């Protein structure tokens, strides 16, 4: 069925269709609307979720962890500083192997304080052991959220899943959207039946015991293997989802990559802008293409290397700084992935769009201009630069 | 199901539980934590009146009781904190330095 919804509305609607057991609810811009819309569903009796209003995000994630350990399906939503306040708990959820589902509405993480979009919040949480799936638009935000539980709850995976969308750009802009029927969603999601949980009386369970060094390393290897196993499961769930929705998802989307010589690698809503730029350049005969990373954790390194193997020059566009002084996090992953190729394309990193700084098709075209120049001359120039800031020097 | 008694410090990662979950109650009983002790209580049975005051004070449940009689310490779990010596009104417990002798 077709509708017009904002990204936040779409996720709240997905939540209503899922009817989770527990929500740890705490507001923070721009994710506030998710628990807000959902509270209405609770008040109207459209779901029977235990809606727990807490005093902080540290507590909302704690509620989710406890509920999930008890055997319930737990969800929450947050952004920016809220995600940062969950930091310790993110590790706890993942290491206790509790498949909590979190809608992260990406917003810059202070400071200076800013409520607009970039990816610094979720990128800061990239090593917590959570699966991370990013959306380009409202449709993907809805679809990704529906796919999160079948991925995370799989026994071989058992990891929490963070579905991310761009704050305001995606969360607040209203777009046309295709919604699934609730019965179809419920059937797709299925019942949550963990093998062991705190409320199971047959075998009392201890969750998160102290782990001495003779065991800790082994448990971390188990967790790392689960993250590796998640990749195949993500694709499996995507195939199942395609059957009910007709919409196809992979670890990343390749846009006009078949014969592309110049390519971008980026995440999120900028893909829409970049696709328009690619189309325009294609009309001018430029062999431009785009890879939009959908799954950042687990990182599709081998697949990405294959997809970029025949390009000449690639720009990674990072919507978070990272402050490594060596490029952003997406660049680090991409460059590492390409290392195993016999012949590698030239690679640059452009950090852009921080704190809501706009990016236009002309900006993307400029990046392709730089790539064309690199491919033609073999002169790569500065590898890691910023785009969109006012500067005394010219930048692209 | 992986039971606590079946895992030890030689168990490979493939045979451990996810997140270190434990699927049974009371597994602390199986683990020798008495090796952490640096002081050791000595029980003087002749002086003991079996008043049972020391028993609930022991933070490690290391003073066993059977048929209304207090038995010698459970040195697999006693940490040598000395609380029992402190609460005993009849000097039936004295602490000695070192953890090794009674293991
Ligand atoms: S020394 Fe401490 S741990 Fe040991 S039996 Fe006495 S009270 Fe219990
Ligand atoms: S407190 Fe002293 S007298 Fe009483 S049971 Fe314990 S050892 Fe015996």
Image: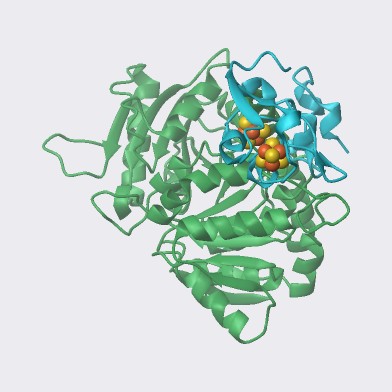
Chain colours: A green, B cyan
Specify the quadrant of the image occupied by residue A114: bottom left
Q: In which quarter of the image is the C terminus of chain A?
A: top left
- Write down which quadrant ligand 2 falls in: top right
Front-most of residues A283 and A350? A350
Eyeballing the image, is A142 above or below A318? below
Relative placement, left or right, of A68 versus A156 is left
Picture residue at 60% right of the left edge, 66% below the top: A23
Q: In which quarter of the image is the N terminus of chain A?
A: bottom right
Question: How many numbered marks does the figure carry?
Answer: 0
Front-most of residues A263 and B11? B11
Residue A353 percent location from the top left of the image: 33, 48
Specify the quadrant of the image occupied by residue A115: bottom left
Front-most of residues A245 and A41? A41
Picture residue at 64% right of the left edge, 24% below the top: A217
Relative placement, left or right, of A22 versus A322 is right
Q: Can residue A295 be seen in this view?
A: no
Picture residue at 57% right of the left edge, 70% below the top: A52
Eyeballing the image, is A203 above or below B35? below
Relative placement, left or right, of A394 versus A164 is left
Residue A235 percent location from the top left of the image: 73, 43
Q: Can residue A348 be seen in this view?
A: yes
Eyeballing the image, is B27 above or below A22? above
Specify the quadrant of the image occupied by residue B75: top right
Front-most of residues A369 and A221? A221
Residue A358 percent location from the top left of the image: 31, 53
Relative placement, left or right, of A387 versus A271 is left
Residue A359 percent location from the top left of the image: 33, 50
Residue pushed farthest bottom? A44
């Amino acid at each position: 069925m077709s509708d017009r919804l904002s990204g936040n509305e779409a996720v709240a609607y997905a939540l209503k269709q899922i009817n989770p057991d527990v929500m740890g609810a705490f507001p923070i811009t721009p994710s506030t609307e998710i628990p807000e819309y959902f509270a209405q569903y609770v008040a109207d009796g459209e779901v029977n979720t235990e809606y727990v209003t807490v005093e902080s995000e540290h507590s909302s994630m704690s509620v989710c962890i406890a509920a999930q350990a008890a055997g319930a399906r737990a969800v929450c939503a947050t952004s920016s500083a809220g995600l940062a306040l969950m930091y310790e708990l993110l590790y706890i959820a993942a290491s206790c192997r509790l498949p909590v589902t979190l809608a992260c509405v990406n917003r810059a993480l202070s400071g200076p304080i800013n409520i607009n979009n970039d990816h610094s919040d979720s990128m800061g949480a990239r090593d917590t052991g959570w699966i991370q799936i990013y959306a380009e638009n409202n449709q993907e935000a809805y679809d990704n959220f529906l796919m999160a539980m079948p991925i995370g709850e799989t026994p071989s995976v058992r990891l929490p899943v963070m579905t991310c969308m761009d704050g305001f750009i995606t969360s607040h802009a209203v777009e046309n959207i295709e919604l699934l029927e609730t019965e179809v969603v419920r059937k797709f999601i299925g019942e949550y039946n963990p093998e062991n949980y705190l409320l199971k009386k047959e075998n009392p369970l201890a969750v998160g015991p102290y782990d001495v060094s003779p065991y800790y390393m082994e448990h971390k290897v188990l967790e790392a293997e689960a993250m590796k196993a998640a990749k195949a499961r993500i694709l499996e769930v995507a195939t199942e989802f395609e059957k009910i929705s007709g919409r196809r998802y992979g670890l990343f989307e390749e846009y006009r990559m078949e014969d592309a010589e110049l390519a971008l690698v980026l995440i999120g809503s900028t893909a829409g802008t970049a696709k328009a730029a690619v189309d325009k350049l294609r009309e001018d005969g430029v062999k431009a293409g785009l890879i939009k990373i959908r799954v950042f954790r687990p990182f599709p390194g081998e697949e990405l290397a294959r997809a970029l193997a025949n390009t000449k020059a690639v720009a990674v566009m990072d919507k978070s700084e990272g402050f490594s002084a060596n490029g952003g996090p997406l660049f680090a992953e991409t460059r590492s992935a390409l290392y195993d190729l016999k012949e590698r394309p030239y690679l640059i990193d452009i950090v852009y769009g921080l704190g809501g700084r706009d990016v236009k098709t002309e900006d993307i075209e400029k990046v392709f201009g730089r790539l064309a120049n690199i491919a033609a001359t073999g002169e790569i120039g500065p590898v890691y630069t910023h785009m969109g800031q006012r500067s005394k020097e010219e930048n692209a | 199901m992986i039971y606590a008694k079946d895992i030890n410090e030689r168990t490979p990662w493939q045979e451990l539980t996810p997140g270190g979950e434990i699927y049974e109650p009371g597994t602390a009983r199986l683990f020798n934590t008495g090796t952490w002790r640096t002081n050791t209580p000595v029980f003087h049975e002749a002086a003991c009146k079996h008043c049972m005051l020391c028993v609930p004070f022991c933070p490690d449940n290391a003073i066993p009781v059977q048929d209304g009689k207090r038995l010698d310490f459970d040195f697999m779990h006693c940490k040598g904190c000395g609380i029992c010596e402190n609460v005993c009104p009849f000097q039936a417990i004295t602490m000695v330095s070192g953890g090794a002798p009674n293991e």
